[in-house]
Image (tube, helix red, strand yellow):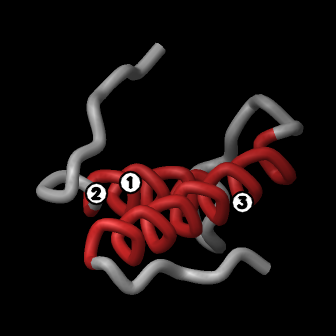
Amino acid sequence: MLVFAVTPDSVELLNTLAAAFWAIVAPGAPWYDVKHYKHACPRVAASLERLAGVLAGAWSGGGEAAE
């Protein structure tokens, strides 16, 4: 389990974590043993990126509209 607080100063950590998930399933990456990663990692990475954008927009005062 990974636990950390997200603040306006640390919201970029969400994008760093998302990049790590993308790297697991990137073309040319070492093969992974868990077949579900093919579907789960991209979904988690995209969700983390979206959360980072929403939080950054909310904390900057502009907000980001939900799709």
The three-letter code of the residue at mark 3 reads: Pro
| Residue 6: x %, y % from top left | 29, 42
Q: Residue at x 27, y 32 (%)?
A: 5
| Residue 7: x %, y % from top left | 22, 47
Vertical placement of residue 66 versus 51, above or below: below
The three-letter code of the residue at mark 1 reads: Leu
Between 9 and 27, the one lying in front of the other is 9
Whether pointer 3 and pointer 2 mark residues with C-beta atoms closer than 8 Å, the reply is: no
Q: Residue at x 40, y 69 (%)?
A: 58
CA separation, marks 1 and 3? 14 Å
CA separation, marks 3 and 2? 19 Å
Instruction: Quickly name the residue at label 2.
Output: 11
Position of residue 36 in the picture relative to residue 64 (left or right): right
Instruction: Quickly name the residue at label 1.
Output: 14
Check the image and name the residue furthest to the top: 1
Tag 2 or tag 3, which sits nearer the N-term?
A: 2
Tell me the crowding category of disc 2: few under 14, some 14 to 19, or many 20 or more residues within 10 angstroms, Cα based.
some
